[in-house]
Structure formats: C-alpha cells, structure tokens
Image: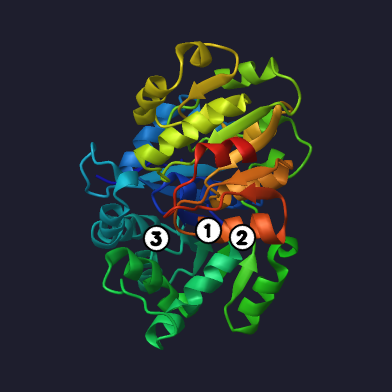
Amino acid sequence: MDAMVPASASEKCQLHAVVVPYPAQGHINPCMQLAKQLASRGFTITFVNTDHNHARILASHSQHSSIWKDEGLDIRFASIPDELPDHHDRMADLASLSQAVDDQMPAHFEALVAELCSSDDSRPTCIVSDLFMNFTQDVANKFGVPRVAVWCQSAASFAIHVHMPLISFQGYLPVTDVSNYMYNFKLRPFQRLQEAKCVLINTFDDLERDVLKALNDGKCNVLAAGPFLPPASLSKMDSKDNRTGTGIWPEDQECITWLENQKESSVLFISFGSIARLSDIQFKELVLGLEASQKLLLWAIRPSLKELIHSLLPKSFLEGEHVYLTSWVPQTLILSHRSVGGFLTHGGWNSTLESLSFGVPTIVWPCFSDQMLNRKWIVEEWKTGKGFQATNAGFITREDIERLV
C-alpha cells in the first residue's frame, strides 16, 4: 500500500516538487541533496522512495523525521512498492530491481500523483526524477506536470550515453549485448530527452565545462546543477552538517572517535560503495597488500566480507591500532576529517565529488559502469589521484597495491 506522510490541511503548497530517485543508495543521496537545495529555496518536497528503502532509512536513522524540521525544510516522505520480496538483495541483482522499476512501480506512482493532484493545495509544480525512472515522464505527461530529469553521474558519462545509439547502430563498435535488459534500460530514457523540460546534471561548470558546452551545442538541454552534496561540503560550515539522513544502512559513528586519536593525514579510508564487488581471489590480494603497507586503515566493508578478512589477516593486526573495520559510515564526515590523508575508492561519482570537495587524494580501483571513465578524469585530466592498472587478465597483485598505497 502506498504510504505518504500527510501535510496539515492549513498548509498551502505553492512550489511543490515530487522528487523520485532510482532506488539505490548512490542515487538516493544526491537526489536528497538536490531536494534539500530546492526546499531551502521555498519548495515543498515530496520525496518518493520504495517501501523497502523507506523502511530501511527509518530503521537506520531514528532521528530521521526530525532532521528536516531542525533545518526548517518542508520535506515530506512518500513510498511506493517495488513488489520484490523483502529479503531480495536488490543491490546484487540490479536487473531485477530495474525490471521492477519498469513493470511494478508506474501504476503506484501514478496513483500517488493522482492523489496529490486531487487538491489544489498539494498539486505538484513539477516532478524531479532520476533519468532512469523513465515511467515518471508518462505520469508527468498524463497529469500535465512538467518533469525535470536528474543525472546523478558526470556530464561525460551522460555524453557517452547520448551517443551510444550512434556508436552501436552505425557499427562503429561491435556491441554484442544490445538484447541485454540493462543495456536497453539504460539507453531508453535517452530516446525521450526532449520530453523533459531539462536535465540537471550532478556536476559544475569548472569541472566539466567543455563537455557541458558540447552537450548544449548538440541541442541537449542540460544544466550543471551540482555538486549534490551536503551544505558543509561546499562551505566552511561545521562538519556536523555533513549528513544525508538517507542511508539505508545504519552508520557507525564510533569511527569518528577513532579518527580523533590519529595523527593528521595518517589514515587511508577505504570504501567500494554499496554495489561494487571484487572476486574472492582479488579481495584476498587487496587485504594482503594493505597489510603489507602498514598504513592506518579505516575500512568500510560489507558485513558479508568481514569473515573473509578475519580469515586472512593475523589477529594481532586486526586487534591492533592499524585497522578499524566497520560496515557503513558517514562518508562525508570521514573525508572532511583532518586525520584522513587518502581514499581508496571504486571511483563512483558521488565518492569522486566528495573527495574533490574535501581535497582528499584518491587511489581509484574502478569496477564497473562509469567508474572507468571517472578514473580517467581523476588520474589523467585532473591529476587528483592515482589509479590501478590491471595486468594478467585484470588481476592486480598485492605488490602493486602495497606500492601505490
């Protein structure tokens, strides 16, 4: 059943944006930051998650409902079902999640928008939705509500997606997976770009000026609206304001206490995000290379991999002062901390923007999607970090890891 936190009858919605992220952590966070920016400029926000993610966010942040009140923002929460079983590992099976987005969520979202449109007090001014939430364009068209699309990756990644049909259909590259569901899921929204009023890209002019100019010269109506980061990432505000409130895993705050006891720029922070995965053999090589480096490590790792780490590393190393293992952390708080001197990352776009904002050099280990492109920008263009070069059929040795760290 669709769920929505109601507004009181006396509240009048003048500017009302319905914000809809793709239901994955790396999309929810930047969309929430965009929503907060809109709310700070007078918009009422209805933020739409899946039932599954909404329940996890509430469970992970007991103070969740008060965060926005503390900031004086009018952000309300709605949720719609994706019809997947609760136990389904959505991040390990993006194809099933994306198919649920296409097949199950449209009718529920249409019902939600119909309810909002039934009253002049709550009728949306616009729908602001992740580009991959393609069905929201149909709902926007049906109810006569303008839709603004959001691209959570880089402008360069957007440009590649725009030109993929030209590359594949004209035979410039032998694309072999055109029948793959995810291939088509990612390209379909680009066939409808002109239906959206514009596309907001999570970047800024000084970072990708040439790409943005080329896109607009090519008649793509895109705006650099980013970076979609917490306010403290963009100013000298107190670091306690570096929070999102939309994490779907409980965050370990004790790691900040551990960082307080370390010397300035002495800690290597390690995180591969919520989706990226290494093979067991490669993961073992990573662990042994990090041990050999003898660096102080703050490592955010999935619970399923902790047992493997404990089987690989000496107990004395794990229980000593060199390593702090945890599962999910307040990443912006960590990257802004004086003790952190480097960031070993998969190179996701959110992590890339955060490390740039806080001036933390990166070691990039790309795994999939736009991460290879981000590595190229970081290492070759911006020169703000180093990157691993895979050898031996993609394998990276412990010696290479120790050397680069």
Q: CA distance from mark 1 to mark 2?
A: 7 Å
Q: Is residue 95 above or below residue 253?
A: below
Q: What residue is disc 2 on? A: 376
Quadrant occupied by the C terminus: top right
Tag 1 and tag 2, C-beta contact below 8 Å: yes
Q: Is residue 329 above or below residue 37?
A: above
Element under label 1? helix
Tally of marks: 3
Q: Residue 200: x percent and y percent? A: 58, 64
Quadrant of residue 277 in the image?
top left
Find disc 1 in the rendering and name its residue.
372
Q: Sequence-wise, which precedes: disc 3 or disc 2?
A: 3
Asked if residue 28 is positioned above or below residue 114 in the image, the reply reads above
Q: Nearer the viewer, residue 7 or 217?
A: 217
At x 56% / y 43%, what residue is drawn? 345
Residue 79: which numbered mark, if any? none
Q: Label 1 crowding class (10 Å Cα cut-off): few <14, some 14-19, many 20+?
A: some
Name the residue type under label 3.
Cys
Badge 2: few (under 14), some or many (20 or more) residues near its Cα, within 10 Å? some
| Mark 3 touches mark 1? (CB < 8 Å) | no
Left/right of residue 108 with respect to residue 168 in the rendered view:
left
- Closest to the camera, between mark 3 and mark 2, is 2
Q: Of the numbered discs in the image, which one, if any, rests on residue 117?
A: 3
Residue 16 location in percent, x, y? 52, 56
Is 58 placed left or right of 266 in the picture? left
> Residue 6, image x and y in percent?
41, 41
Residues packed near mark 3 inside 10 Å, few (<14), some (14 to 19) or many (20 plus):
some
